[in-house]
Every structure is written in structure tokens, then in C-alpha cells.
Image (spheres, rainbow, N blue to C red):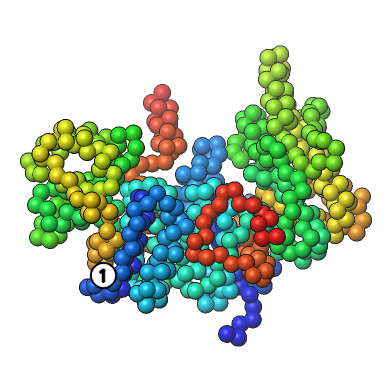
Amino acid sequence: MKVLSIDTSNYALGIALLDGDQVIGEYITNLKKNHSVRVMPAIEALMKDCDMKPSDLSKIVVAKGPGSYTGVRIGVTIAKTLAWTLNIPLSGVSSLEVLAASGRYFEGMISPLFDARRGQIYTSLYQFHNGKMVNQKKDQLLLSTDWAAQLKEQSERILFVGNDLPLHRSIFDEILGSQAVYAEMTEQNPRPAELALLGKDKEAEDVHTFVPNYIRLAEAEANWIKENKEKARK
Amino acid sequence: MTNVDQWIMGIETSCDETAVAIIKNGREIAANIVASQIESHKRFGGVVPEIASRHHVEQITIVLEEALKQAGIQYDDLTAIAVTEGPGLVGALLVGVNAAKAVAFAHGIPLVGVHHIAGHIYANRLIAELQFPLIALVVSGGHTELVYMKEHGHFEVIGETRDDAAGEAYDKVARTLNLPYPGGPHIDRLAQEGEATIPLPRAWLEEGSYDFSFSGLKSAVINTVHNAEQRGEKIKPQELAASFQESVIDVLVTKTIKAASEYKVKQVLLAGGVAANKGLRTALEDKFKEIPNCELIIPPLALCTDNAAMIGAAGSIMFEKGIQSTMALNANPGLDISIHN
Ligand SMILES: [Zn+2]
């Protein structure tokens, strides 16, 4: 089984190739550069290095968000078009779950996060049980101060993972003190090989209807729904 | 391969239509699928870019599949994939560009980035073979341009709007008259029912200029409505629509005819969504009788509004010119039409 995984949902760009039970290629950058320009050339180059043709692939796995709307759309569009045109299965994995995989050997809870501006973060809570990742809280968008307050209720230690940690670390330090543990610099990028591993045995999506997990409605749509609810009340 | 026919897949997602088409030998439509989002955007009174982008992701593989099914061909039959590279809404363009790259990569098919306006112009080649030199009048929600072509794939903009596009002015005037979105067709319909009795300005700009300007006209319409309201009078929407439309068409047609004579062209092509406007079509046809030895081509309505057949048609010529894009092709909302001249 040959799996191609693609993650363009946040600043890190990641691509990996699995062949059976081996990771044969992995490409990661953590740059504020244009994913649309770089991701297909990166896939092309990695597959060439690995002597793999598109027709050799047996599955596509993509990070489906949350993250940058544009970023996640680029990855999902490429993944679903490749899966459809090659007629192979597609699986989507939460971008946060991929990041949480960095905490594979951590005993407590894992909180992966991406900054979502204005003090907010995309985050969730995971824990490894017998080598399997278990989701404890769903992917959500909230203020990091509110998140820290929720986590304070937990008895276990929390491992925070993500390149955007420096933006929120002082809040976690202040509210959680020694309950908060921080991943090392080398664990902060979401690993595309982990994405491939998480998705390779996951149930296949319906390619046509597969869309990113944006978490939020588009602003115009949210406002429209609010206005119509108000109108309905009157 | 013994297949000598050229098969181009066109992909267009620059605004609110997800469209895929298959064009045979540059001129024959083998498939032309358009998934319109207009019903979704109506509630907002205009296209919302983020929502347009989301709809494109929902539709893209469905539309691709439909197009191949309609054309009855396989990937291996395709000569090249042409995709709108720009201009347009960047988030919307990105979906088409990345889908096109994925298909091209998966099957080792050449990729060609196409300019959206070149597409609109080449919609005409699906109706009649182009003869050079020619002038194209491109009028849409985002564009008002006169483009001179001395040969295939060579585009020279000789006039363009300095402010609003004609289609934009239509939408704003429609809003002033409380007409539903999109307003253009409503104004065109109302204009057929009324007389152009209200004097409105025409922006001819400086002597010899082929440029356009519609913001003054738009303001004049809004002022006319407000002043009437203040006097407690009611303006007949039919009369206002007819007067506004007459002003727009007068400038468009006069400048086009002048350019056609000055550049001694063999053909004048009408292109873009506003080309669906009955008033504009009729006025151009009438005036055209004045210039001999010049053919006027007006595509049917379905080829005037955004579609992918036009992208396939333009892509066919660009591919023949040897233009190919790499896997690094990006969406370019400000793409210049003369880049490959
Ligand atoms: Zn257009």
C-alpha cells in the first residue's frame, strides 16, 4: 500500500510517502510562503526521488483543517482531485490530530494548537492509550485564556504542541503553572508521516462531498443567519 | 498515439461559476458543464469571495466528472488542461488552478494557464473562425475593455475603464432601483419597456481615447433618484433604466465602431457577461450596417457569461503557441492579458 499525505492547512507544508510499513519520503517546511506555488512541485519532486509514479499510489490522506481557509482549501482540492482522477480512496484527518501525534510518548493529555488571531486558538485534546490516539475534546476555536481555564479542571499534565506556542505560552504559564508542559522545537511541526499513518487505515470519504473542516462559517453567512434569526423573532 | 484530434479540458473558477468543458480541435464543444452559485450569493446581494471559494471545493470533482462523461472521453485522450489563472477572486481561482494541476500531474498532461478575458474573447471562436485583425469589446461585471488582436493569442488593450466596469454600474443602478441581484438582466428588461426620457451624462473622455468611465453616470442616476424623492416625485423605473442603458450603450457602441474603422478590422467580437444584454446587441447590430466589410460576431448567451468552453478554446490556441505552465502555476488576480504577446 502506497500512501501520499498532504498538509497545507497551516504555515507548515508537509508531504509524505508511505510504502507498506515504511516512511520512504517526507518533506516539511515551516515558512510563510505560498502553498499554492510550492505544494505540487514538492509532491512532484518527492515522488520522483522515491521512484514513484502517480498511478502507483493506493491512497491519499489530507489534513482537513482547522487552519487557514485558503491553505486548507489548497490541500483538500489537490487531495480530492488526485483521489478522484486516480480513482483511489481519500481520507481526511484533523490538522490538530496530526500535530498531537508529536506527543505519542507523553503520559498526560496533549493540546495541539494553531493561532487563530485576536487571542484565539484552534485546539482540542488528545491522549494516547495503548499506542492509539484518543480524542478527548472536539476541535474548536476559542480564546487561549478560556482554554487554559478549562484545562485547569483536568488533573493530568497537559503537553502543548505547535509552532504558534510562543504567542500563548505566557497565558498557559500563568493559569496552569507546572501543569503545562511544552514540546521541544523539533516536535512543533505537524509531521506529514504521522498524517499518513493516522489516515492510512481510516474509512474512505466520499470524494465528491469531502470538504475542509473550517470550524467557522464564513463571516457573511454567520451574519446573514443572525439577521434572519432576529427578523424571525420580530 | 494515432489520435490526431486535439482535446482540451478547460477549467474556470474565477468568480461564482464552477465550470469544466472539453473542446475538440479548438472550436467544437464536446462538453460544457457550469455549476452556478448564484442562488447562494443572491441572499448577500453580491458574490462573497469566501463563500464562492467554499462552493468551488464542493463542486469541482463533480463538475470534472460530468464533463468527461458528457464528452465520452478518457484522460488519456486529453491533449492539455487549460485553466483560468486570472484575473478573478484569488481564493476562487486557487481551487481551479490546484485541481487542474492535480489532474495534469496525475496523468502527465500538459498544463496551460489562461487569461479569463482571453477566454471571453475566444468564446467567439466556438461560433465562427476568427479573422485578423479584429477588435473585441469585452463587457462584464469586472471588465470593460477594447482589445485589438493582430493574430491568434496576441492581445493589445486599446481602451479600458478608468473606474467602474459597465457590469458594476448596472449592479449599482439596479440596487438604487431596488432590483434583485444580479441587476443587469432586470435593467435590460425594464429598459425595453420604457423610453429614455431622462438626460444622463456620457463620458467620452479626451479626444481619441478608447477608455471608458461609468462612475459619473452611476452617480448621476443615484442623484436623479434622490432629487426626485426629495421633491416627492416618483421616477418611472422603466424610464430610468432605459435612459441609463442608452447612455452606457451609446458610449460602448460609438467607441467600438470608431476603433473598428480606425484599426481597419475584419471582425468585431462581443464578449463577457454584459454581451447578453439585448439593448447592446441590438444597438451594435444596427450601427454595424454603417461599416462595410466587417463582420460582427455575438456569441449565444450561454457562452457570454462565465463558462469553461471559452477557457478551453483560448487554451487550445495558447497550447499551439507553445505556452505551457509548470506545477508552480499560481492564481494571479491581476494577470496581464498581453503577457504572452
Ligand atoms: Zn467573466
Q: Is residue B15 left or right of residue A189?
A: right
Does the closest atom of ligand 1 sit within 8 Å of the Cβ of label 1? Answer: no
Q: Is residue A153 left or right of residue A230?
A: left
Badge 1 local density, few (<14 within 10 Å), some, or many (20+)? some
- Which element carries disc 1, helix, strand or loop? strand
Quarter residue B217 falls in: top right
Where, quadrant-wise, is the C terminus of chain B in this rendering?
A: bottom right
Residue B273 at x, y = what percent?
67, 48
Identified at 37% across, 76% down, the residue is A52
Q: Does residue A212 appear in this view?
A: no
Q: Nearer the viewer, residue B204 or A161?
A: A161
Q: Does residue B5 appear in this view?
A: yes
Q: Nearer the viewer, residue A99 or B216?
A: A99
Identified at 53% across, 69% down, the residue is B68
Q: Amino acid at mark 1?
A: Val
Residue B130 at x, y = what percent?
77, 64
Residue A152 at x, y = what percent?
12, 36
Identified at 20% across, 56% down, the residue is A101
The residue sitting at the bottom extreme is: B2
Q: Is residue A86 left or right of residue B184?
A: left
| Looking at the image, residue B329 lies above or below residue A215 | below
Quarter residue B166 falls in: top right
| Looking at the image, residue B325 lies above or below residue B107 | above
Disc 1 designates what residue? A23
Q: Nearer the viewer, residue B335 or B41?
A: B335
Where, quadrant-wise, is the N terminus of chain B in this rendering?
A: bottom right
Quarter residue A205 falls in: bottom left
